Image: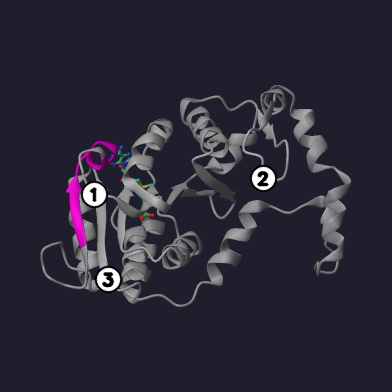
Amino acid sequence: MWIRPRGLWDSSPVIVNVGQDSRQNPHRIQAAVNSPRGSDTAHYGVAKGHNPRMGFAYSDLRPYLDSLVPPRHPELVEMERYAAETNFPILGPASCHFCYLLARLAGARRVFELGSGYGYSTAWFARAVDENGGGLVHHVVWDEDLSDRARGHLGRLGYPPHGSGARTEIAYTVAEALGALRSTEETFDLIFNDIDKEAYPDTVETVHSRLRPGGLFITDNVVWSGKVIDPIQNDSSTEAIRRFTTMMSTDDRWVSSVVPIRDGLLVAQRR
Ligand SMILES: C[S@@+](CC[C@H](N)C(=O)[O-])C[C@H]1O[C@@H](n2cnc3c(N)ncnc32)[C@H](O)[C@@H]1O
């Protein structure tokens, strides 16, 4: 299903049943890919010998985009090395650098992470918070060993635990993340979502209630390795991501866009 707006800024859209159709009919997707607009790319600097109509492998962009991120603190490099060695799904340099940019633009000083891992994305948010004047980043994961590991990394990066009196601190919670967000009374400038994908649709109302107006809600994995546009993929995670993305894109309380960096970030601002 997709939405055709009535007018330029008209908030009462007409709903057209096309997306559903596309899932059932892969030829519609192929038709869009092959449309004459594809030839627009010929106007931009394309490497000699490369036929832009053939497209390119999306995954080939990743090392290129990562290579554009400025050199990192040795502790972050170690965290990247560990992720590569253990196949742990961190966001990686390009996505995190983009989140860091967004957090800076939002002037974020109160950040809540849903599903934090061992603190790689937390470190980037903490850096933005610190550069915005200091504040608090909530690291929330249900694995105690990951929480402990994060304490070590983030401490060595100069971000001590909450209560230390430092300018920028990390609050650690070992719990189910959405429940932890529900049980806080605070409101946040930015909430970042990287939990189990089946729970994505459940995040919308809680996050809305805990985000200040104008605050940012960023969600990872909305491209899901391309499964979201593959009509034969109907597993529960893929369906939940599709449902979440449709909810966020059609809800007037949010301004949202999908940014196809790495595995796709959905960036939304609460109106
Ligand atoms: C993809 S990893 C996070 C990576 C992190 N954002 C980074 O880039 O460094 C997600 C982590 O959240 C945990 N997790 C998933 N769903 C969760 C939930 N509902 N509550 C708490 N932790 C969760 C997983 O076990 C995993 O450790």
Identity, as a three-letter code, of the amino acid under mark 3: Gly
Residue hosting label 2: 9
Instruction: Judge from the rendering whether residue 67 lies leftward or rightward of residue 173; answer left or right.
Output: right
Q: Residue at x 31, y 64 (%)?
A: 109
Identity, as a three-letter code, of the amino acid under mark 1: Glu
Q: CA distance from mark 3 to mark 2?
A: 37 Å
Mark 3 vs 2: CB contact within 8 A = no
Residue hosting label 1: 186
SS category of the residue bearing label 2: loop
Q: Residue at x 30, y 74 (%)?
A: 133
Specify the quadrant that holds the N terminus: top right
Of the numbered discs 1 and 2, the one sitting upstream in the chain is 2
The residue lying toward the viewer, choosing from 122 and 168, is 168
Residue 172 placement (x, y as % from top left) = 18, 53
Identity, as a three-letter code, of the amino acid under mark 2: Trp
The range drawn in magenta is 170-181
Instruction: Judge from the rendering whether residue 167 lies leftward or rightward of residue 11; answer left or right.
Output: left
Do we see residue 153 in this rendering? Answer: yes
